[in-house]
C-alpha cells in the first residue's frame, strides 16, 4: 500500500479524532489498541480537525519525529486553539511579579540542555548510590500489604511506593511525608489539559505548597548539606552549574508529578498483564532474573504515557502528509510500540522478547529523565511481589479493574487482587 493510500481519510468506522483513541472515550479507556491498529493500518498520519493536531501511529514516524531536533517541544509554539497549545494555557491569574517557569518537560534548547544536563549529572549517580535503599523500601511496602485475602494493589502498593521513594531521594523529612504525598498527588492534575476548575485549584495549591517547601529545603541544604539529591543540586549550583533556585524547584516538582504518576501506572499495568497472562507470570515467578526484560515488555505493551507532543516549525512532510509551521503533533507511543512492521506478534505479551527498542519513554533529547528510576522500582517490585504472593491472581469481583480517566496516559486506578491460589 502506498503512503498516499495509507494516509487517506479514515474509513467510516475508524477513529477520526484523538479523543476516540484516548481515555476520553470509555471504550478506548479500557483498550485503545484495536482503534490504534485501525489508524496505523489505514491512516498512520491522521489530522484531527477539531483539535488542529496531527496524530502519528507508525513506529518509524514516531521515532524520527522524537529524534528530530528541528521539531520543537514547547506547546506555546503551537497554533492557537490546537490541542497541543492547550498545555501552555495559564491555569490561574498571576501577579505581574510572579514568574511562570517551565520545566524541562516543555523546554527547547538552549534552556533544555542548560537545565537538564546538571540535573542528570546528579540524579543518575544518586539513584545508583541509593539502589540498596530503594530495594529495601520496595520490600517494606510489599511487606506492609495484606498477607491474605483481597486488596487493591494500586492503593496498597503502586500509588504509595513511587512517592515514598522520590521523597527519600530528594531528602524530604519524615515528619513532612504526609503533606508531601498530598501535594504530590494534587500535582498529577498538571498533566491533564482538560482538568476541572476544582482540580485546577487543588493542583495550584499543591504546587504552591511544594514550591515553598522546596525553597525552604534548598535553603536548609545550602546551610547544612545532607546525603540527598537536594544537597547534590545545591553543590552543583555552588560549583557553577547554570541553575537558579526557581528552576531547581520547578524541576523537582516535575520529578514528582510525572515520575509518580507514570511509575504507579507502570506497576499497575505490569501486574495486570502478568495476572492476565499467567504463563508469563509463571516464567517470572520461576526465574526472577527475567524481571528486567519483563519490565521492558510491560513498557512496550502498556506504556504509562500514551503520547508525547511536538510542534512542527517549518513546512514539511511526514509519511507523505504536508504539514505547516506551528502545527501540533501527537506521537502515539502506544501505536508505535505495537507496530507489526517492527515487532513480531506485537499484541502478544512475551517477557523474553528480543528485538528493537520500544519508545515508551519517548526519544531524542527529551528521553524521560526518570526512566532508570521507574525501571529500578518496578523490577524490584515484581520480584518482591511474586516472592510474597506466588499464587497472586486477579479478583473475581465485578469492577476489579478500573482504568485511569486521565487523557494521554494509561494505567489502572483500581486493581483488586487476591492472594490465594486460583490456578
Image (tube, rainbow, N blue to C red):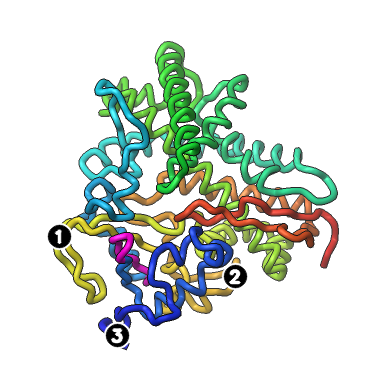
The residue where tag 3 is placed is 5
The residue where tag 2 is placed is 350
Q: Distance between the residues labelled 3 and 1?
A: 24 Å
Q: Can residue 377 be seen in this view?
A: yes
Residue 250 in the image: state x and y as whole percent: 37, 31
Which secondary structure lies at badge 3? helix
Mark 2 vs mark 3: which is more N-terminal? 3
Q: Is residue 116 visible?
A: no
Residue stretch rendered in magenta on the structure: 49-58
| Magenta portion: prevailing SS class | loop
Inspect the magenta stretch and tell me whether residue 55 lies in it: yes
Q: Nearer the viewer, residue 309 or 186?
A: 186
The residue where tag 1 is placed is 314
Question: Are the residues flagged by discs 3 and 1 in contact, CB closer than 8 Å?
Answer: no
Query: In the image, which is nearer the foreground, mark 2 or mark 3?
Result: 3
Residue 11 in the image: state x and y as whole percent: 39, 82
Query: Residue shown at 43%/48% (left/top)?
Result: 194
Which secondary structure lies at badge 1? loop
Q: Distance between the residues labelled 2 and 1?
A: 40 Å
Mark 2 vs mark 1: which is more N-terminal? 1
Amino acid at each position: 500500500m502506498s503512503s498516499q493510500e495509507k494516509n487517506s481519510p479514515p474509513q467510516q468506522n475508524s477513529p477520526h479524532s484523538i479523543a476516540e483513541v484516548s481515555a476520553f472515550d470509555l471504550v478506548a479507556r479500557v483498550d485503545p489498541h484495536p482503534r490504534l491498529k485501525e489508524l496505523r493500518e489505514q491512516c498512520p498520519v491522521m489530522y484531527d480537525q477539531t483539535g488542529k493536531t496531527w496524530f502519528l501511529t507508525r513506529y518509524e514516524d514516531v521515532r524520527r519525529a522524537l529524534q528530530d531536533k528541528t521539531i520543537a517541544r514547547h506547546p506555546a509554539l503551537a497554533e492557537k486553539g490546537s490541542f497541543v497549545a492547550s498545555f501552555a494555557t495559564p491555569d490561574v491569574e498571576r501577579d505581574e511579579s510572579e514568574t511562570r517557569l517551565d520545566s524541562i518537560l516543555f523546554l527547547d534548547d538552549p534552556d533544555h540542555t542548560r537545565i537538564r544536563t546538571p540535573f542528570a549529572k546528579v540524579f543518575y549517580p544518586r539513584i545508583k548510590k541509593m539502589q540498596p535503599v530503594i530495594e529495601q523500601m520496595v520490600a517494606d511496602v510489599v511487606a506492609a500489604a495484606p498477607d491474605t485475602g483481597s486488596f487493591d494493589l494500586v492503593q496498597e502498593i503502586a500509588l504509595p511506593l513511587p512517592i515514598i521513594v522520590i521523597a527519600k531521594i530528594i531528602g524530604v523529612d519524615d515528619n513532612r511525608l504526609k503533606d508531601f504525598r498530598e501535594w504530590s498527588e494534587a500535582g498529577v492534575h498538571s498533566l491533564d489539559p482538560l482538568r476541572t476548575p476544582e482540580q485546577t485549584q487543588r493542583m495550584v495549591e499543591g504546587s504552591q505548597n511544594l514550591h515553598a517547601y522546596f525553597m525552604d529545603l534548598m535553603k536548609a541544604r545550602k546551610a547544612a548539606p545532607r546525603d540527598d539529591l537536594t544537597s547534590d543540586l545545591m553543590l552543583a549550583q555552588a560549583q557553577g552549574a547554570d541553575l537558579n533556585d526557581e528552576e531547581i524547584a520547578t524541576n523537582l516538582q516535575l520529578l514528582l508529578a510525572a515520575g509518580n504518576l507514570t511509575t504507579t501506572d507502570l506497576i499497575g499495568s505490569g501486574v495486570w498483564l502478568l495476572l492476565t497472562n499467567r504463563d508469563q507470570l509463571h516464567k517470572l515467578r520461576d526465574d526472577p532474573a527475567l524481571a528486567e526484560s519483563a519490565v521492558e515488555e510491560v513498557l512496550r505493551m502498556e506504556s504509562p504515557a500514551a503520547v508525547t507532543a511536538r510542534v512542527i516549525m517549518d513546512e514539511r512532510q511526514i509519511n507523505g502528509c504536508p504539514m505547516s509551521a506551528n502545527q501540533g503533533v501527537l506521537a502515539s507511543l502506544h501505536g508505535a510500540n505495537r507496530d507489526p512492521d517492527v515487532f513480531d506478534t506485537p499484541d502478544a505479551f512475551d517477557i523474553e522478547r528480543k528485538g528493537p527498542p520500544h519508545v515508551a519513554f519517548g526519544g531524542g533529547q527529551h528521553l524521560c529523565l526518570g526512566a532508570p528510576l521507574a525501571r529500578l522500582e518496578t523490577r524490584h517490585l515484581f520480584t518482591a511481589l511474586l516472592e510474597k504472593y506466588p499464587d497472586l491472581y486477579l479478583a473475581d469481583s465485578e469492577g476489579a479493574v478500573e482504568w485511569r480517566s486521565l487523557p494521554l496516559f494509561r494505567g489502572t486506578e483500581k486493581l483488586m487482587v487476591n492472594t490465594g491460589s486460583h490456578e
